[in-house]
Image (spheres, coloured by chain):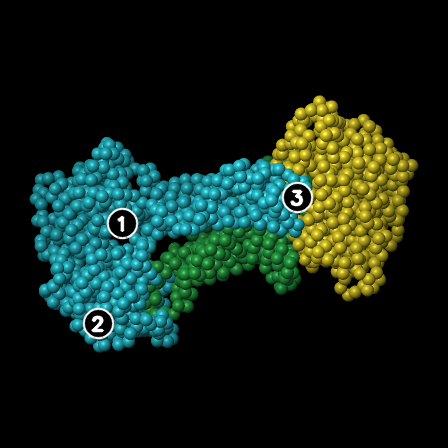
Amino acid sequence: MITVRTLRPTLLVSAGFLLVLALAAVAAPLLAPHPPDAVDIDHVLAGPSFHYPLGTDSSGRDVLSRLLYGARLSLFGALIAAVVAVVLGVVSGLVSGYLGGRVDSALTWLATFVMSLPTIIVVLAFVAAVGPGMVSTMLLLGVLVSPMMFRLIRSSVKQVRNEPYIDAARVAGLSETRILRRHVLAVVLPVVLVQTPIFFGASLLVQAAIDFLGLGEPNAASWGAMLNDASGHIYQAPWLSVWPGLAVTVTVLAVSFIGNSLRDTLDAPSAMASTSPGVRDRRRAARPVVTTAVDPRTAVLALSGLSVVHRTATGESSVLRDVSVAVRRGEVVGIIGESGSGKTQTVLAALRLLADSGRITQGTITFCGRDITGLSERDMNALRGRRIGYVSQDPMSNLDPTFRIGSQLCEPMRVHLGLSRRQARARALDLLQRVGIPRPYRVYRSFPHEISGGMAQRVLIAAAIACEPDLLIADEPTTALDASVQAEVLDVLRSLRQEKAMAVLLATHDLGVVADICDRVVVMKDGGVVEEGPSADFFARPRTPYAQALLAACKRDEPGPPALSTDGFPSLLKVRDLDVAYVRPGFGRPAFKVLREVSLDLWPGETLGLIGESGSGKTTLGRAVLGLVNPDAAADIRFAGQTLTRLSRADRRWAGRPIQAVFQDPLGSLNPAMTIESILVEPLLADGGTLDPATARRRVRELLDRVHLPADIGQRRARELSGGQRQRVSIARALVLGPKLIVCDEPVSALDATTQAQVIDLLKEIQRDTGVAYLLISHDLGVVRTLCHRVAVMAGGRIVETGDTETVIKAPSHRHTRQLLLSSLVPDPREQAARRTARLQAAEAVRTGPSR
Amino acid sequence: MLVYLARRVGVAFVVLIAVTFLTFVMLHLLADPVREIVGRSATPDQVAAKRAELGLNDPIVSRYGSWLADASRGNLGTSWFTGIPVTETIGSALPVTVSVALLATATSAALGVLAGMAAAFRRGWIDKALQTATGVAFSVPALWVALLLVIVFAIRLHWLPATGYTPFAQSPLGWARSLVLPVIALSLSPVAAIANQTRSDVATIMQQDFFRTLRSRGLPRRRLLFRHLLRNAAPKTLTIVGLQFIALFGGTLVVEEIFAMPGLGIVTGSSALRADVPVVLGVVLVSTLLVVAVNLFVDLAVGWLDPKERQH
Amino acid sequence: MNRSIRLAKVRRAIGASLASMGLIYATAACGAGSGSSAADRTVVLATPTDLTNWDPAVGGDDLATLFFQTVFSPLLTVNVDLTVSPGIASVYSYNGTQTSLTLTIPAGQRFSDETPLDADAVKRNLDRTMKTKGGSATSLANITSVTVKSPTEVVIDLKAPDPGLLFALGRAPGMMVSPRAFGNAKITPVGSGPYVLDQHASTRGSRYVFARNPAYPHPERYGFDKVELRPMRDFNAMIAATTSKQVDVGGVAADGVEPAKAAGLTVKAMPSNVIGMWLVDRGGELAKPLADVRVRQAINHALDADGFIKAISKGGGTRTTQMFAVASQSYDASLDSRYPYDPARARQLLAEAGYPHGFELKMPSENAFEPAYYPIVQKQLAAVGIKVTYIPVAANQIADRYLGGEFPAFMWTYSPSDNWLDATYLLSKNGIYNPFHTDDRKVTGLLARIQKAPRAQQQPLFQQLNRYVVEQAWFAPLNIDPVYITWKPDKVKGTIGDKQMFIDLRDFQPLAG
């Protein structure tokens, strides 16, 4: 977890100092020139001399010797308090955070109570009653500060509990204690590592204060007692306080440096993981294509030969190489490529919003004929928001959560256009209507968390176009949205282009989006442009093999497997009258029903697709089957004839072992602290596993082979793998226990198109080989079509339509299904145009008159 | 909201009763105060009479009950030693401690937030320098700093009074002067704590998507810093400031000793050691009330600052 | 020695010794204030502790005396040589059997609230004090009745002669409170002293401001128009306030002498405290060897008093072997050379007593006492074979555990005052500072004779008693540890005698002109 490479010099120096100090404390009898209590009545409060290197104290005792012996007492005392606080805090925090409920309430109350105690009175009263004693006082101190540790641990445990990999561990049939030990503790450990030094340092300081107040043992050789002695003679021997003062200060400093360094070191990997796309060093440089289609002087935006490097822990890595892209007025240019190909970096470079570590090494950025490559931040700010608008991916995280939508919308207009509050507000409401928000005032008054993702994306667009910019830069503007919302947002962009002749630079990995809206396409790979040209040409005749592969991976229009004949067979999974309600916190709030009367059957070897917009209940249904949410009492879930709904926790765990899961977030569902092999071996060895470790490990190697991963991957950790590899690991884990059913919740939606295709093939292959059944949750009709025998369409917590895949897709019977189908994009401009027309007509028909 | 408030107040009430009862029992276990009250040379008869007068022969629960009944009517009794009503003792000591603690909190909040934001925003050497400075500030024992401050600024330079407290009403300037050194000594550690917290919060916020989006709108730096960053960092900052205030409030004893300020710490110390039960209970009640009130205020304020919480 | 319990840090040696600053009134004569009074004549005095409450009837606490003497007048006056002279009572006389004391209260005296201070007011005060539970009542325990003979005459009848009574009437028990203010005596002081408390300008615990009492008959004795007392609980705070000249009159311990002189202050030492080891288990209940007088003498020889003076008192103390006050009639300078530092002699005495290899001794240690003594005492006793183990004791438990007979010996500071009081406390069988109730026939006999003797004939008896106790080595006193009084010579004219043990407000007068 911590490698020598990542250790910082401060950590080494601090740890070295503490080590030396500890050794000196242990070896005090050897090192100290005098015993700690040896008095020299003729040399009281003497200055430094050969005999007494640091002088003597008020009893004529050698300061250096007492300092050395003092290290023993002080460090030991602080250690007692820190250990008590940490042990109490960790145990209670773990219990409280993991179990929740009454235990949690009781312990939290107890912590509040202890924290409300007036510490000083308690210590005074304690010393008064028990008498001065370092050990007893430090024990008490540990108890008094333990609630702080409790709170930290409790909150981090609560956080871990919601991590997908805890769900994964549950699904794998691990017992609570094992999950607590293996998974939760691993996360708590860093907190403990970071906090223990802090508690230790604080205890040292408090101990000094206690001794200073005269509440400690008289004449004890501790630093606090030395400070006490020095403070009594600060006029005669002002330097006397310097030594113990410095000893305390430097020790606490060293200890807190260790805490800080540990925190930074432990944080570092996750921070790196979050910035990994585009930061990886690429050996194979893409051959740059010469683009001549656009004259930079006439373009709104032109990047010419742009190269960007990022500073990383291991040196500089190049993320953009010689990239040239240009956008003209009224033109939509799409930048496509797999994740990590440099799309986002290109977009951010154009905005001059590269991360602090990034730097343009070559090339120019021209905006409306002006070179803005080296423009000052102030001058850039005059352009950003005013003449260049930016719409980002993931709408929810791109709105400031603490300001109302209205205020965020008005802000750029008031800054750039100097509008009055009233003018800005009128215009903001106008804009909201313009981007298709039905009740603008309500949204205007809302906070970001109060609106849906689709609304938020529209708000972002509204904010980006508020000052009527010449150029709109959009980075995956629709990726996080449901199909129908996606289509509508694209409609908004299209109309903007048409009405205001706005230039749009759009980065996306979705070729459907490109087919829908882009005039020209720039294909990127490994930080360079590999192909560039009109959109129609790209779809019709991709020139480079990379572009061809990209396109091929997206085109999944081959029909899926035909429905299986199930007559007469007992179903594998039988769900009846499943209701799930979430209880909202607080008194008297009605429970919120997520699933209503859901019934379905799934046969062995079959894949059932669950489709529907977000919030329709797909995921909750999957989680109910996995036993991760509790259904209402009337529900019945039967697996292979046996009920799952009325079992004890342990029985449910055992009965659920043949049902495994693959989750959407491949990184989150793998414990970052564990190696791949230990993640995979765990379910085999834990709780009733009969295999010996060697066999288990062999099984794991076979599994890795089966999911087409190299065997050496077992020693690595999740963050060192690519997205596709992680998902393969997840699949391998689902297979470990030889399941009959795997619930796949959006198994490929976080992956690139090419990787998606590979994982889909793998899923098919496994089904063919093992006869496992899949319950596949997806919003992507293409994926569903290639994989599923049958589909169930969900809306508002109900299943509204079920049937053979081809039947449902070709002849949808429910309005929701039709809407879903029309809204989904196809990577073919001509077909997409047709679909769009059909969708708009349908919408028009709904608006003009409810004929159907 | 009302339900929430009612629940919090209810919990606070239970905490108050539990804390005061625990203190009551603890004091009971201390050395007998009666001999100290009547003097060393008192006869056993006098001791017994005093004991009866103070009600020390009654069972502890009934004594606590009658104290609680009086306290709920605002009557905290009178000191066994000084005969001064406890409310008056606390009334004269509380302003001292609150002055010091509030001023130190305000100072450290202002400095800490500014320093933390500067470190996160500017990075580079400012960040490194501040990190080191806060590290040292956290590590230096406040009592040592206080001693050094007295030596340098009061005794050597004669710039500021070494000791004592001047009430605000008596002389606002004197009040301010008497607080400078104690506040400096007390502020070091909280400044460090608040600066570190703010720094990491601001750094986290700056890494979030919305911050980049805000930058993409060409907003001036000052607006980014003092509107968006500060507003987003506010809940956590407020939480730590509240914690620091509570810690300061409890920790003024050392500086009150060094600077000879007649604050609550001194009252606490002397009354706890001689088991002056009414005074200690009064102090405990008031300080617990303060802790509970500050916590409640911080929670409410944080809830209000966080729009997601505000709805509940 | 009668120390109140404060936070441990506060005390050390200085806390104990400065406690005596306000203990007794000094000579009445010492300050006839200069006539010319400037518009603002304020004197600021630092005191080592805060006042507990304003009621002298409760406050057996010596520390309160400096506070009390600003507001109240006592019936009699105690001088720096520990003699007694008239106060409110202009004449006082005992009958032949020393059991009836007659006080003459001159007419025309008034409290600051205009209430007459006559014989009736005196009786009501004494009656109230005797009924009030506290240290003052204990001092008056021998009184059977107080009778008003006339508005100017009071007679106090005693059940037995009480040589300490006159002294007590010069201290808190003799402080007269206006009968109209009895009800609120703890909080609002109304007396007949030179000053009245300005409640408005005062901050409890921090500063007490006093203005002149217009009704006081001798304003010329007090030169300052305003007096301010500032309690400074912390040792360093006191030095800091003194050397930074925040206060006009202050007190420092040995450490503060040089800084105070460097700051241009006048520094005067007062021989107020006796520091030493108390060998209280003279019957050998806990430590058998202590029962042998030779062992106790050996301990006296084993401790290097001059070394302590040099090392800890910075040369400022005086070697002593006696517990009585330097200024008192019992004190005999020749006794101070009785036990020279002589480890060889100590070992010899131990061997004679049957402990050639010494013995083990458990002693308490606590932070209020100057902690620097402990390791040195330990070392010096170890040098003659006595192995000392210290047991830490919390500040609040000192009195109970030390005086409860839990330890055979301990280190402590004593502030002696009136010989009779010291003798009854330290030496009588039931004296509160005689935890093992050592009952020596010779001591008891001498005490009985002193009690009955007229005051003039007490001195030889006290000296005999003192000599006997020193010879018996009931204690191992080390040195007289001075309290250093400092004042600003450019503002204050201070008058402190060489043997003076306690300061009086009148010791400090404004500079002439």
Instruction: Report in which chain the residue with disc 3 lies.
Output: A
Report the front residue among A6 and B69.
A6
Q: Nearer the viewer, mark 1 or mark 2?
A: 1
Q: Which residue is mark 2?
A: A327
Q: Residue furthest top?
A: C354
Q: Are marks 1 and 2 on the same chain?
A: yes
- The relative height of residue A466 versus residue A722 in the rendered view (above or below) is below
Q: Which chain is yellow?
A: C
Q: CA distance from mark 3 to mark 1?
A: 64 Å
Q: Which chain is green?
A: B
Discs 1, 2 touching: Cβ within 8 Å: no
Q: Amino acid at mark 2?
A: Val
Q: Are marks 3 and 2 on the same chain?
A: yes
- The relative height of residue A388 versus residue A72 in the rendered view (above or below) is below
Which mark is drawn over residue A843? none
Q: CA distance from mark 1 to mark 2?
A: 37 Å
The answer, for residue C176, to whether it is visible in the render is no
Report the front residue among A74 and C186.
A74
Q: Quadrant of the N terminus of chain A?
A: top left
